[in-house]
């Protein structure tokens, strides 16, 4: 493989759920590949069969595709270093472990369960950290051969140095050094001949030519052992990029168990796919400039590992909303109406409503589509409102001034022949001038009369245009009646 080409991999375990933190790792992994003109690989790490969930791989495919993270090599599309499903690679690991035994970096361990349990009990009782005690580290070649010939079950363990330190470099966390004495001689090959996750991960990354390993920082503590394995094999160590978790708040991680939203949940809540992806990019990564709204192409250009933060990122629903609002404002008016229509139709079934006008009104005021039904629930039918709403301190209106205003507004609007926003506007402003009153004296009562609501998207003029002449006049008459 051309060593100059950047190859990254996203290596999810199929658990049946892709949380926001996972997707963020996938996104960073994708961006680092694409930014460097490299290759983004999908590898399914399903060796931990206990966690396997039917259909889980499909959820991974679907979520990544929907988020725009198309892989260049992967289980369903193949590639030069397949298979891309870890459980289908099982045959290759043992020979690598044996190679390490040969070179003195691993050893056969014949300790049985009882002995290991005994060992653990003693360690626990004396407050020592759980760690293999090295019982089989120094068996002679003959002893090993004898036991193997006798068919004694065994595992293969990594032979970590017991003195000195191991240092590795991480692009986010810098140089990390550990005391070798603290490292556990972890199992590489289990008694059933299968690799452990940690061993398979390293061998897979190497044999797949992975140059950059991007993953959650929960793997930082295993990385010294991974590094020792690379060194033992004489393999080039990949660039490590560990990312901190995405948190719900200062103490809790985002998780399915907490009922926190997945990508699909957010999409179902009315967020745009691109906006979710944009927001996820900002979880633990800070762009250089002020701008935070990026298309995928812009993200590929702007993304830089130096902007990744060591601190955990906190999922901020308000910021997601604001980013989504920015995306909504960027939509063409036609596209906005297309996407908003199912939400509009939840409360507004009137066929004669001009959707383009309604779209113009809603687009600048919508951050999430799910806000729409409530915003326009007065269009089909005027709610039974309280006349106290006519009293507005700032507008200096009360029920008396409102009644007087509506009585003037009615004929003024009756006289408007061509029912356009401009004409409605002109008629009302002529009235305001003639009466010598403040705008609010006329416009506030109109808004209340036509909507029956305190908060509406747009003011009385826009709402009147959308409601149509007949309905507007009927609602003004109703207001007069209520106030009289
Ligand atoms: N399969 C691991 C996970 O889902 C990924 C570990 C890695 O990227 O090295 O957490």
Image (tube, helix red, strand yellow):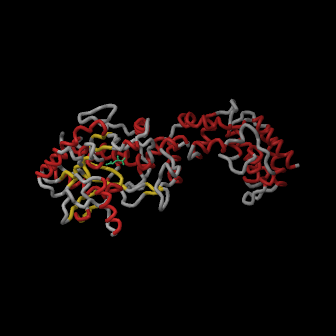
**Residue 33 location (% of width, % of height):** 29, 44
Q: Is residue 317 left or right of residue 25?
A: right
Picture quadrant where residue 137 is located: bottom left
* Residue 286 visible in rendering: no
Q: Is residue 184 left or right of residue 431?
A: left
Q: Is residue 224 above or below residue 346?
A: below
**Residue 475 location (% of width, % of height):** 79, 41
Q: Residue at x 64, y 35 (%)?
A: 345
Q: Residue at x 32, y 40 (%)?
A: 43
Residue placed furthest toward the front: 150
Q: Is residue 74 left or right of residue 144?
A: right
Nearer the observer, 399 or 55:
55
Q: Residue at x 47, y 53 (%)?
A: 254
* Residue 165 visible in rendering: yes
Picture quadrant where residue 26 is located: top left
Count up the numbered dots: 0
Quadrant where the N terminus is found in the figure: top left
Nearer the observer, 30 or 294:
30
Residue placed furthest toward the bottom: 126
Q: Is residue 188 left or right of residue 23?
A: left
Residue placed furthest toward the top: 351
Nearer the observer, 171 or 282:
171
Nearer the observer, 240 or 396:
240
**Residue 294 location (% of width, % of height):** 42, 46
Q: Is residue 385 above or below residue 92?
A: below
Q: Residue at x 55, y 43 (%)?
A: 269
**Residue 391 location (% of width, % of height):** 78, 56
């Amino acid at each position: 493989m051309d060593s100059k080409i950047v190859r990254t991999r996203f290596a999810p375990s199929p658990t049946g759920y892709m949380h926001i933190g996972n997707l963020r790792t996938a996104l960073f992994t994708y961006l680092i590949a694409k930014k460097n003109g490299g290759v983004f690989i999908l590898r399914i790490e399903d060796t931990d069969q206990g966690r396997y969930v039917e259909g889980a791989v499909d959820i991974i495919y679907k979520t990544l595709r929907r988020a725009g993270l198309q892989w260049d090599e992967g289980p369903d599309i193949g590639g030069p270093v397949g298979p891309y499903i870890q459980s289908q690679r099982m045959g290759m690991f043992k020979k690598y472990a044996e190679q390490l035994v040969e070179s003195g970096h691993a050893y056969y361990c014949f300790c049985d369960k009882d002995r290991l349990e005994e060992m653990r009990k003693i360690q626990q009782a004396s407050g020592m950290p759980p760690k293999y005690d090295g019982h089989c580290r120094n068996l002679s070649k003959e002893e090993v051969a004898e036991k193997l010939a006798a068919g004694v079950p065994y595992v293969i363990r990594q032979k970590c140095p017991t003195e000195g330190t191991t240092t590795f470099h991480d692009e986010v966390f810098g140089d990390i050094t550990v005391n070798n004495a603290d490292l556990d001689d972890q199992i590489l090959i289990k008694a059933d001949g299968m690799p452990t996750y940690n061993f398979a991960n390293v061998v897979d990354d190497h044999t797949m030519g992975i140059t950059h390993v991007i993953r959650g920082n929960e793997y930082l503590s295993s990385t010294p052992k991974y590094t020792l394995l690379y060194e033992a094999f004489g393999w080039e160590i990949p660039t490590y990029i560990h990312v901190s978790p995405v948190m719900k708040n200062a103490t809790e991680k985002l998780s399915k168990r907490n009922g926190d939203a997945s990508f699909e949940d957010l999409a179902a809540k009315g967020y745009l796919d691109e906006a979710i992806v944009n927001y996820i990019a900002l979880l633990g990564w800070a762009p250089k400039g002020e701008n935070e709204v990026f298309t995928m192409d812009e993200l590929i250009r702007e993304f830089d590992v130096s902007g990744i933060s060591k601190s955990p990122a906190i999922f901020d629903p308000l910021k997601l909303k604001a980013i989504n609002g920015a995306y909504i404002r960027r939509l063409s008016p036609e596209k906005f109406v297309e996407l908003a229509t199912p939400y509009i139709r939840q409360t507004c079934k009137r066929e004669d409503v001009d959707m383009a006008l309604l779209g113009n009104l809603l687009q600048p005021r919508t951050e999430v589509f799910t806000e729409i039904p409530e915003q326009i629930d007065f269009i089909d039918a005027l709610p039974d409102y309280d006349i106290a709403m006519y009293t507005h301190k700032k507008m200096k209106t009360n029920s008396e001034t409102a009644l007087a205003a509506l009585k003037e507004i009615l004929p003024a609007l009756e006289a408007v022949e061509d029912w356009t926003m401009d004409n409605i506007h002109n008629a009302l402003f002529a009235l305001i001038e003639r009466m010598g009153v403040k705008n609010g004296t006329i416009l506030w009562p109109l808004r209340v009369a036509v909507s029956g609501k305190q908060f509406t998207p747009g003011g009385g003029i826009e709402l009147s245009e959308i409601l149509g002449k007949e309905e507007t006049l009927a609602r003004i008459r109703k207001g007069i009646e209520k106030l009289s």
